[in-house]
Image (cartoon, rainbow, N blue to C red):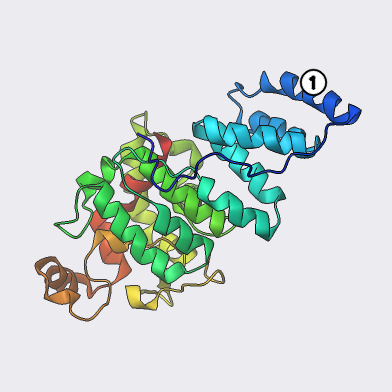
Amino acid sequence: MTNHLNQPRPGNFLLREQSSSTEMSCLMGLEELKSHLSSKSKETRIAVLSEALKCGQPGKNWIFQILKHETGPVQWGAYDVLWDSANESTRQKLLPYWPLHSEVGVDYTRLRDLLAAGQWKEAEGETKKVMLKAAGREKEGLLDREASENFPIVDLRTIDQLWVKFSKGRFGFSVQKQILQRLVGEENVNPETSERRRVAEDFKVHINEFGEQVGWRMAGNWLNFRDLMFDTCAPEGHLPSPSFATPCNGNEGEEQQPWGRWCVSFCFGGIKCGVLFLGWWSLLSRLDS
């Protein structure tokens, strides 16, 4: 299900220029490029879109039409190519066209705007809010392992893409997954095989290393949520944190809730509490689906 909330109506977003003989030649070339968009290779699709940029404004207009009408990786690729080639003013115009897809009708507009503005702490809180809503766990106030294993994959990808894009590849679930893969062994990370259970077990072995790599564990100790770094100087994969896996984020009063008391009693509000309670691999593995 695609979330159409706050999607702008098509308009004259990209200025049209008068066609020249060179542009006409490019337009003919664009028709040929279209046939390659169906390639299964992400690299090929991105290369096609990047090639279209060489046609100047007609190429940008063509890519923009793809952004508006395609779905999935091709749409993401079109957005990436336009975004990376745009100046700040054009990026502000592009922002409302970000593909905010959701299987369950969650609106990710505020999360997008917070991340685009670099408001990492506020975006962390909004991530918890929208993930609980997407999983139908708002009443409980935390995401448990069963919910994470069944988390809507379209929504997870939307949230991940937002974090990755606006942090310039520093933050996001897929960034964390890459770090975990390096620790566990990429050849084992296949959710369609019997190896998946063993990878989950390996994660338990590597949990301390993983925590150190993403900056959730320092000097041999796991951090509390209040000690997170909300800055791009933080280690890669530092955000988003497992704050949605426990209600005790280190905020005053939260420990008064039943789950909060449990969390404080067993692990004093530390990030490790959320990681273990959720089973971090159970969420990251959803990105394979």
Residue 274's place in the image compared with 51, above or below, is: below
- Percent x, y of residue 276: 27, 58
| In this picture, residue 38 sits left or right of residue 268 | right
- Disc 1 marks which amino acid? Met
Image quadrant assignment for residue 259? bottom left
Q: Report the quarter where the C terminus lies.
A: top left
- Percent x, y of residue 169: 57, 55
Of all residues, the one furthest to the left in this rendering is 258
Which one is in front, 48 or 142? Answer: 48
Q: Is mark 1 on a helix, strand or loop?
A: helix
Q: Which residue is drawn at 67% across and 18% down?
A: 35
Residue 52's place in the image compared with 182, above or below, is: above
Which one is in front, 178 or 207? Answer: 178
Image quadrant assignment for residue 227? bottom left
Of all residues, the one furthest to the bottom in this rendering is 252
Residue 259's place in the image compared with 94, above or below, is: below
